[in-house]
Image (cartoon, rainbow, N blue to C red):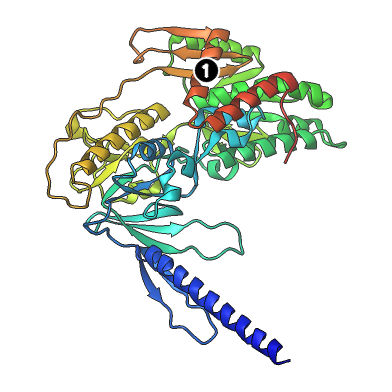
Amino acid sequence: MAWLRNLSTMMKASSSSSVTQRAKNTYPFSFTFLSHLSINPVKEKPCVKPVVECSGLEPTRAHEKPRVVVLGSGWAGCRLMKGLDPSVYDIVCVSPRNHMVFTPLLASTCVGTLEFRSVAEPIGRIQPAISREPGSYFFLANCTHIDAHTHTVHCETVTEGVETIAPWKFTISYDKLVIALGSQPSTFGIQGVKEHAIFLREVHHAQEIRRKLLLNLMLSDVPGISEEEKQRLLHCVVVGGGPTGVEFSGELSDFIMRDVRQRYVHVKDYIRVTLIEANEILSSFDDRLRRYATKQLTKSGVRLVRGKVKDVKAHKIVLSDGSEVPYGLLVWSTGVGPLPIIQSLDLPKAPGGRIGVDEWLRVPSVQDVFSIGDCSGFVESTGRQTLPALAQVAERQGKYLAALLNKIGKEGAGHANSPKEIEFGDPFVYKHLGSMATIGRYKALVDLRQGKEAKGLALAGFLSFFIWRSAYITRVISWRNRFYVFVNWITTVVFGRDISRL
């Protein structure tokens, strides 16, 4: 048996050597990764693995690539990250969502015309360096404070549910900071809006609208439901006559006419849509297009009400004239305003509470800080008007700033507080390309004027609907999502919309 004992000894030695070799290969990698972080190791106890507490990303060194920190993953932030050169900068994105939402098609997901994945583009696909480069990261977190003097951003992780870990606070040092946090829906201080209304800005908003709509349809079909309650459950109210409100109303009316009336025969005569607007719907569009939209929406069964909302209760809204409108589903789309974090920042402000920027989208009085998208506006000293909160404005700003930052980095001024003076070149100039909106029933509006008072091409009808779909499918970022959108459109035409409540 001596040979068996010798074989056992040799196997143990081989195993020990293999483990030692793996440890040698593992620890240098871990150390290299954590060298970007400020660490406080806990003292190791016997038989207990060491715990590493990460407090943040430290400032970059002179021999390292400068770091651009982007706050937000909306149109502006994502277009900026797409255009940044990863060979010049390390890119760090901080956002409470790990994807970009293609908002022009979001209303179509509420009624099943498109799947939710069709309008969500992962950050890692928009800028692959975030997933591949060792110095680039994406952090699922909210920005809580910006210290422009020390070039640091304070963040807190996003967690969900009751049994998840507590939010983790950390800091990020930046060389260049781009604030692209977007905006929030305006409620104008009306009580009950946040508690009872649903906004339409994120994918989870569209999911909530769809679940609520289908739930009300099924509940209204249950025996014993009174006529009054059935009418309330199947009354969909949309507040806000801008492009979002009109497009959702059009999609909803088309869904009712083509799908609900065929599959919910018992309640088909009860479901209705009301659009409430204080002024004219689609106020930025041509007068002829507005009249056409009003006619088509009314023809589709949408009731247009001009009035101001005074109060929102659990099952009804109260207008300024005292009239009450019961509802089963309430969608709120009355414009946007600055986020609380934007209002709290000690930075120059533009009219309306946005972060003030100059002609090159820099924040005056602080160094290495830029702001783009809905959260920014020109300071009064520039003599420029604040640009509207539109996707095309944010996208154009992101593209411009990416080119500017690439130029700064390639000329050696990418690091924080760089003393090198460079020529920034032409300032940012926005040229409006026009507006488009769908109103259901394969009809849309296309207004190609550069301004409200300017002259230009204005179209309505099926041709405009074709232009609308063609334009937006080309603007979808990835070929994957373009394929999804195209297949969803064909499937809807052939088989109708899916009415499953998942």
Q: From the top left corner, tell me how far across and down residue 393 is, in percent.
A: 36, 28
| Mark 1 nearby-residue class (10 Å; few <14, some 14–19, many ≥20) | few
Mark 1 residue element: helix
Could you tell me which residue is drawn at 61 percent across and 64 percent down? 163
Height in image: 233 above or below 347? above
Q: Residue furthest front?
A: 3
Q: Quadrant of residue 421?
A: top left
Q: Is residue 193 above or below residue 249?
A: below
Using residue 397 as the reference point, say whether residue 138 is left or right of it. Answer: right
Name the residue at 45% across, 49% down. Answer: 131
In the picture of the structure, the residue carrying the numbered disc 1 is: 470
Q: Position of residue 492 (x, y in %)?
A: 69, 23
Along the line of sight, the residue nearer the viewer: 178 or 229: 178
Residue under the point 62% across and 81% down: 11
* Left or right relative to 150: residue 102: right
Q: Does the rendering let one see residue 179?
A: yes
Compared to 177, does 436 lie above or below?
above
Number of numbered discs overlaid on the protein picture = 1
Q: Name the residue rendered at 74%, 29% in the picture.
A: 231
Q: Quadrant of residue 354?
A: top left
- Along the viewing direction, whichever of 320 and 73 lies nearer the viewer: 73
- The outermost residue toward the bottom is 2
Q: Amino acid at mark 1?
A: Ser
Residue 214 image offset from top left, x and y in percent = 73, 35
Q: Quadrant of the N terminus?
A: bottom right
**Where is residue 146, by image quadrant?**
bottom left
Q: Position of residue 84 (x, y in %)?
A: 33, 40
Image quarter where the C terminus lies is top right
Residue 264 position (above or below residue 122): above
Is any part of residue 282 visible from this angle?
no
